[in-house]
Image (cartoon, rainbow, N blue to C red):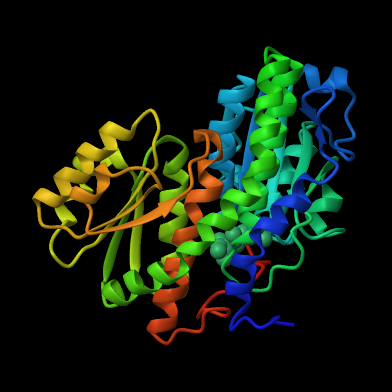
Amino acid sequence: ELGGYEHYMLKEIHEQPEALRNAMRGRLDEENATAVFGGLNLTPQQLRGIERITLTGCGTSWHSALVGEYLIEELARIPVEVQYASELRYRNPPIENNTLVFGITQSGETADTLAALRETKRKGHRTLAICNVVGSSIAQAADGGVYLHAGPEIGVASTKAYTSQCCVLTMLALYFGRMRHMSFERGQEIIEELHRLPGAVQQALSCDLQVRDVAAKYKDATNVLYLGRQFNFPTALEGALKLKEISYIHAEGYPAAEMKHGPIALVDKATPSVFIIPHGTTYDKVMANMEEVRARGGPIIAIASHDDPQVDSVADDVIRIPRVPEFLQPIVSVIPLQLLSYHVALLRGCDVDKPRNLAKSVTVE
Ligand code: M6R
């Protein structure tokens, strides 16, 4: 079952190029430069009338919701709100008419997400699920939805489901964008980039050996900071969660610019910072943050574009990823972070696939 891999988590990390292909199969419509989904159960007119989107989920699925917020707002220009499912249920927020609510979940059994979706549905809102497990409780409770088709995810730490969720959200952003202002040419460009994505993820996976060395260097850390901006801010949160849950090292993710408002006080020789700094609009600003950390003696691991020589002078270790457009960076830049948490956990003798105190699906509130 493990197909030659030592753990499910490692197997699932390496399955990501294939999982992405499966998520996209039959859903990219070149002729109309858009995406197509079979199970939304809403007419084009109803979808055209959507004025707001709420994305909800827990844990890693909440992180993909944050990626979705950046994606949908940038590509489709629809205002998006992200809510923890556990908060949404009891907060009783005023949700406006013509709001579409997406519950995002790998298992489809998370009690908080199920309850949030039922509550919003009860109020008369349209609810959809982005879900991996076919026929699961959340898939059934929603009015419709999109399956990830990522295949079974056994490791407690979510990996391929996360990147598949980001991929589905990209296709939804394309779909909603093309219903509105997005040009045919822009739609075509996005489809071309999506076709190249599994190859880019495959290339990113080749950093494995190098990541192992980096893991050996920092395995005894007690605190790690993860910093990134814009599309890579959720990646920082996700990298930190992965490290926490399987290696039991305390880690925090922040938008890189927030560091100077408090967390920088944590920086010292024993506290490594992982900067997610591929090329992009905020590159120079993140570089400046990185220099701040260096000036305070903090060790730096940088996740950077393959053709960026500038980071070498500031970071102690540079892990290279292929260049992709900013809106696809979350799917590529998370790969070395998944591997980093895997190798650190392994070196610390932790049970990678079944971390303490955690279950694969959290069916209690
Ligand atoms: O099955 P779900 O996506 O609804 O699960 C939500 C979280 O419990 C889950 O993502 C959790 O945070 C993972 N263990 C993270 O790796």
Q: Mark yes or no: residue 86 visible.
A: no
Which residue of the protein is positioned furthest toward the bottom in this rendering? 349
Ligand 1 located in image quadrant:
bottom right
Most foreground residue, 307 or 272: 307
- Residue drawn 88% across and 29% down? 42
The percent coordinates of residue 126 (x first, y second) are 79, 32
Q: Nearer the viewer, residue 187 or 58?
A: 187
User: Is 43 positioned to the left or the right of 28 in the image?
Assistant: right
Left or right position of 102 against 47: left
Quadrant location of the C terminus in the rendered image: bottom right
Relative to 98, residue 15 above or below: below
Q: Quadrant of residue 90?
A: top right
For the point 86% across and 52% down, which residue is it? 140
Relative to residue 285, is residue 57 drawn left or right?
right
* Percent position of residue 323, x then y: 48, 41
The answer to whether residue 241 is visible is yes
Residue under the image location 57 percent in, 25 percent down: 73
Residue 119, given in percent of the width and then of the height, sits at 73, 43
How far across and down, in percent of the image, does residue 123 sit? Answer: 76, 34
Q: Nearer the viewer, residue 317 or 180?
A: 317
